[in-house]
Amino acid sequence: MRKKIVAGNWKMNKTLMEANKLFDEISNNTFSNDVLVIISPPSIYLSQFAMVTKGIAIASQNVSQYNEGAYTGEISAKMLKEIGVDYCLVGHSERRSYFNEINTTLAEKINRLLENDIKVIFCCGESLNERETNRAEEVIELQLKESLFHISSKEIENVVIAYEPVWAIGTGLTATSEQAQDMHDFIRSLLKKYYNENISTRISILYGGSCKPSNAKDIFSKKDVDGGLIGGAALESNAFLEIIKSI
Ligand code: PGA
């Protein structure tokens, strides 16, 4: 049985007061044992949220590819582990495009996280141009191959993959549930190719990109979609809670 997951990526949103309010509104609920709820706030709020152990896992939005030392502004995987962070996003398209993170850097980040016993939410996705020129699968395979598939079959058990078509992130455009299913099925076939059948059936694959209460049920109903990575709709508790209920 694969884990069902709904993760909220708050990105660089919310003042301290707003963040506390939103976190309380979400964490005051009890969730079904069948779903894991993850919240990924700005890093400055991680330690206070990580102290709350009420059935919500906490994810960092970023980590340094280095262990420690003279890297001004960076946060290490060891520091994240010490304050109780459970997961970390790697490869989000905003990190790739605005901060020039390339596949080989992402591979290093994944190594640091796994060495420090933090689980990885690895994001991959194609641009609109890549989809329109029929290169989506090729791009996804390359992203996974160069950043993720170097890890062992034991390590990959600590990874969740998020398929996030770049053209659907924050745009209001959503992949149809069929498009999501097709790509999730393809990613699962890659897990089988690079690892084995058993692993391919056990890794959770989330969909991300303008997922909201009105489309979550349809997307989550697909057999290879194990939940969602939610941006905009995770910034409002009612919408986020409704998405959680859709799983
Ligand atoms: P969105 O963002 O739901 O606002 O499209 C998803 C994401 O960036 O993870």
Image (cartoon, rainbow, N blue to C red):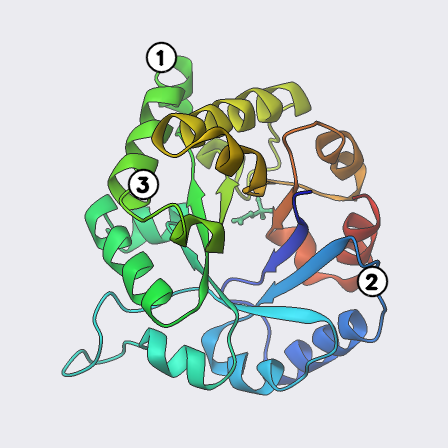
Residue 133 numbered tag: 1
User: Is residue 198 shown left or right of residue 213?
Assistant: left
Q: Is residue 169 above or below residue 17?
A: above
Q: Residue at x 36, y 63 (%)?
A: 114
Q: Nearer the viewer, residue 155 or 77?
A: 155
Q: Earlier in the sequence, mark 3 or mark 1?
A: 1
Crowding near the residue tagged with mark 1, few <14, some 14–19, many ≥20 C-alpha atoms within 10 Å: few
Q: Earlier in the sequence, mark 3 or mark 2?
A: 2
**Label 1 within 8 A of ligand 1 by Cβ:** no
Q: Disc 3 residue type?
A: Phe
Q: In which quadrant is the C terminus drawn?
A: top right
Q: Which residue is mark 2?
A: 31
Q: Is residue 165 above or below residue 65?
A: above
Is label 3 in a helix, a strand or a loop? loop
Q: In which quadrant is the N terminus drawn?
A: top right
Crowding near the residue tagged with mark 3, few <14, some 14–19, many ≥20 C-alpha atoms within 10 Å: some
Q: Which residue is mark 3?
A: 149
Q: Alpha carbon of mark 2 to alpha carbon of mark 1: how far?
A: 41 Å
Residue 116 rendering spot, x and y as whole percentages:
36, 72
Residue 20 numbered tag: none
**Label 3 within 8 A of ligand 1 by Cβ:** no
Q: Residue at x 62, y 50 (%)?
A: 230
Q: Alpha carbon of mark 3 to alpha carbon of mark 1: how far?
A: 25 Å
Q: Earlier in the sequence, mark 2 or mark 1?
A: 2
Q: Is residue 93 above or below residue 217?
A: below
Q: Disc 2 residue type?
A: Phe
Give yes or no for contact between labels 3 and 2 (Cβ–Cβ under 8 Å).
no
Is label 2 in a helix, a strand or a loop? loop
Q: Disc 1 residue type?
A: Thr
Q: Residue at x 23, y 58 (%)?
A: 108
Number of callouts: 3
